[in-house]
Image: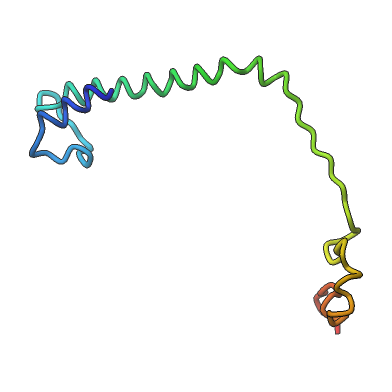
C-alpha cells in the first residue's frame, strides 16, 4: 500500500491525488490507485482477522462491577457533616417541581 502510494504520488505531480474521488480506467495512476485500494482493504480485513483470533482468550475473561452506595440519594455526600455548618440548609434540599 505504501509503495503504490509513493509510485502514484511520484508519477502524478500535477494532480491533486488526495482529493481525487473518481478514477477512470486508463488514466495515469489508475493501476496504482487500484492496487493501493485493494491492499488497503486486505490490510483492514487482516487486522479484523487478527483481532478475531483473540475470541477464545476473551471468552475466559469475566468482568464484574461491585457498586457501593454511600447515600440513599444524590443530595447526600459522605462528608456532609463537615460542610453542613457552612451551607444554607435550603441549598442542600432537593429541588422539586412545584414545591414552595
Residue at 85% in and 82% down: 88
From the viewer's side, name the closer residue of 49 and 99: 49
- 62 displayed left or right of 10: right
The quarter holding residue 76 reads bottom right
For residue 70, above or below residue 82: above
Determine the residue positioned at 49% across, 21% down: 48
Indicate left or right for 4 with 63 as reference. left
Residue 53 at x, y percent in the picture: 56, 15
Dividing the image into 4 quarters, which one contains the C terminus? bottom right
Q: Position of residue 13 (x, y in %)?
A: 9, 36
Quadrant that contains the N terminus: top left
83, 9: nearer the viewer: 83
x and y, in percent, of residue 59 in the image? 70, 19
In this picture the colour scheme is rainbow
Q: Is residue 95 above or below residue 23?
A: below
Quadrant of the rendered image containing residue 9: top left
51 relative to 87, above or below: above
Residue drawn where x is 37% and y is 19% of the image: 42
Give the residue at the far bottom of this rendering: 100
Count of picture labels:
0
Residue at position x 87%, y 47% from top? 68
**Image vertical order of residue 26 relative to residue 88, above or below:** above
Residue projecting furthest to the front:
82
Quadrant for residue 26, please give it. top left
Amino acid at each position: 500500500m505504501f509503495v503504490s502510494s509513493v509510485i502514484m504520488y511520484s508519477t502524478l505531480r500535477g494532480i491533486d491525488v488526495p482529493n481525487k474521488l473518481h478514477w477512470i480506467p486508463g488514466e495515469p495512476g489508475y493501476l496504482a490507485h487500484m492496487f493501493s485500494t485493494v491492499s488497503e482493504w486486505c490490510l483492514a480485513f487482516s487486522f479484523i482477522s487478527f483481532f478475531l483470533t483473540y475470541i477464545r482468550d476473551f471468552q475466559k475473561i469475566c468482568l464484574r462491577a461491585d457498586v457501593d452506595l454511600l447515600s440513599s440519594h444524590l443530595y447526600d455526600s459522605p462528608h456532609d457533616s463537615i460542610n453542613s455548618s457552612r451551607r444554607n440548609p435550603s441549598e442542600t434540599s432537593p429541588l422539586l417541581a412545584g414545591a414552595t
